[in-house]
Structure formats: C-alpha cells, structure tokens
Amino acid sequence: MTEPELKQLLTAITPPSETARAAAHAHWASLAKPLGGLGALETLLEDAAALTGTAQLAFDRRAVLVLCADNGVVAQGVSQTDQSVTRAVAENLAARRTSVCQMAKTARCEVVPVDMGMAGAPVPGVVPRRIAAGTADFTQGPAMTRAQAVEAIAAGIELVRAQKAQGCQLLATGEMGIGNTTTSSAVAAVLLGQPVEVMTGRGAGLSDAGLARKLDAIRRGIARNQPDAADPLDVLSKLGGFDIAGLCGVFLGGALEDLPILMDGFISGVAALCAVRLCPAAAKAVFASHCSTEPAARLVLEALGKAPLLTAGLHLGEGTGAVAALPLWDLALAVYDHCYSFTEGGIPPYTPQC
C-alpha cells in the first residue's frame, strides 16, 4: 500500500452511529437499577453500539494481537536486556506460556502473536508480517523509511480484517519488543510537545544510569531526525518501531471495520495516538483498558480523551492490561442483556432529577 492509497482508504471511516448509541442508552435506562449506576461500564457499551451500529451487542469471539518487533536504539543501552529477549518471549507466546497467555485462558481470549519486525529467523507459531529484521538506531538516523511505516500500518489493518473475517467481535492490543518504551516515549514527546523527561520512565526497571542513557538517546534521536510534530507519519517513521506502526494500523483497521479495539497500556496508547492524529475519526474504535505506571501514560490517555477502566499499577506489556479488562466487558454485557426491567419488576422507572 502506498501513502496516497492509505490516505484514500482512511476517508472511508464513517462517524459513529448516534442512533445506536441512543438505543443502547435507552436500554440501560429501562433496566431496574439507578440511572447510570454502572458508570463507565454503561458508557463503554454505548460507545461500542455507536461503533458497531447496533445496540444488539456480542463479544464472545475475542483475541489479543501481540505485535513483536526489535528496535535498533537498544544499541544505546536503553534497556536492561538485549534484543534476544524479544525472540525468547515470542517463542513463549507461540507456546502459550507467557503472562498474557495465562490471563487470556481465563478471559476466553485467543492470543495471536505477530512478527512485525524481529531480528533473526522466523519463529514458528508467530504470524509472519515482518517489515524488516528490526528498525535502525534512531540516534543515527530514521528508525525506518516512510514507506516502511505505511507498510506496517497496512499490515495492522489487514490483521484486523483477517480477525473479523474469522468472526472476531472484539480485539485487544499487545506488543513485545525490547526498547519499545524508548521508541514510544520519543514518539509521544514529539506528538504531545512535552519534555523528554516528562514522557520517559524506567520501562522494565532501569537503573538511574540506564534511565539517563534512555533520556540521552531520545534527545539525540529527536535532535538528529528533527521530526515534524504535525506529520504523524514523519514522527512514527523517524522515532517509532514496527510494533507501534502495526498497532497504529490495528486501531485504524478497527475504525474501518467497526470493530472495537481494546487498547493496552502506554505503548498501545502511543500507537492509538498516531492513528487518531492520522485520522481523527478513528477515535471511535479506541477503547481504553488501564492506565499504566509509565509517566506519560495518563497524558496519552488525556490526549485521546479516553478514560481507563482499571488503575492497578500494571506495566507488564504483552496486552495483559487489555485482557485484564475483558471480564469487565463481560460483566457489563451480562447486566445489559439479562437484568430485569422496571416494567418487568412492576417498579416505576427512575427519571433524571438534575
């Protein structure tokens, strides 16, 4: 897919259905409980109705897409492990042994690991969508070409379309890539116009010296590449990773296919921010799950206008935060589908008093 083709494709994203949203809201109001009593759980189903175009909702078929990629900036000592760990975790994702795999079993969620750009040979059991064997070190030049960024976005869109064709009704996002909190912080700092130190945390547990190297690498990368904050593709290609670009495509794909995309933490949030900056109408497909402990996580959520369902100090990655929120969707839908109404209970309906 070329950049003009991507831009043309995104013009097909339609506004959410306010008729379906109103129908879902009216259904909530008919149930025998205080108006708005389930708070954000009611809002998320109303938003899902607006996205899908119907107040008849079902999310039995769900999957978490875990996009794996290596990042050249790891050469600057920005993480406590080398890129071999990306591959090791991908192998264990394929074997269904990782943290998100165990959580997904309980949440009745399929795990789909995807190779967006890992170093080394392909990993059996990981969906092959490799753009290149890792990005370049952004302290030396752009992380990827603009065309590669578009290619990764297109791959993310196609992943969503493939899942929908298989009957998937709800997608969660996840990622695995050593160094990807560095790339995410760099992209977010530029897109939000924030100081690097405000947007950068310790990732998987950096020491003070490691954090200093991380901050220095991001500053040098921004100075070297001079990304244009008004051009999200420029920022993404110069400072991002193939995982972030692919996830950007997943959010855009959700908007194109009217499929809810449950966003994980900081890295997925930065990808969603890229998607919404590319196409503001894509915001309708973005559903927040949690607020991670990364310093910039709340700033990214605020920029997206999304409120998290969970604030539990999570910072694991792999899509664990998104999968952790799935039971809340199930609980909301259980009440929405099966709670008795005021009419059925012989109770006068509540009416707004303010």
Image (tube, rainbow, N blue to C red):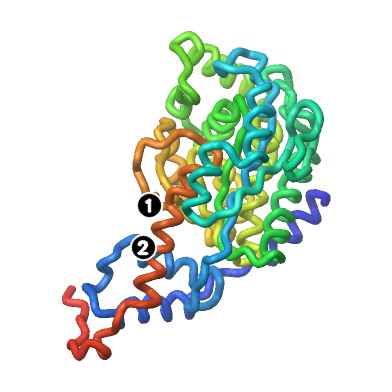
In this rendered view, identify the residue nearer to me: 230 or 97.
97
Is residue 280 among what the camera can see?
Answer: no
Specify the farthest residue to the top.
209
Type of the residue with mark 2: Leu
Image quadrant assignment for residue 14 = bottom right
User: Which residue shows up at 70% across the image and 21% down it?
Assistant: 137
- Mark number displayed over residue 41: 2
Secondary structure of the residue carrying tag 2 is helix
**Left or right of 38: which side holds 257?**
right
Residue 136: name its quadrant.
top right
Q: Which mark is residue 50?
A: none
Left or right, residue 213 beside residue 312: right
Secondary structure at numbered mark 1: loop
Determine contact: label 2, label 1, CB under 8 Å: yes
Q: Identify the residue at image location x=44%, y=50%.
A: 289
Residue 243 picture location, percent across and down: 66, 38
From the top left corner, tell me how far across and down residue 11 is, in percent: 69, 63
- Give whichever of discs 2 and 1 has the lower sequence position: 2
Q: Which kind of residue does numbered mark 1 sit on?
A: Leu
Percent of width and height locating residue 62: 57, 59
In-image side of 244 versus 54 (left or right): right
Residue drawn at x 74%, y 61% is 9
Q: Going 39% across and 58% down the picture, which residue do you hit?
A: 328
The residue nearer to you, when weighing 352 against 329, is: 329
**Mark 1 — residue?**
309
Local crowd size for mark 1, using a 10 Å CA cut-off: few (<14), some (14–19), many (≥20): many
**Residue 108 is at least partly visible in this image:** yes
In the rendered image of this protein, does residue 41 appear above or below residue 320? below
Crowding around mark 2 (Cα neighbors within 10 Å: few <14, some 14 to 19, many 20+) is some
Position of the C terminus, as image quadrant, is bottom left
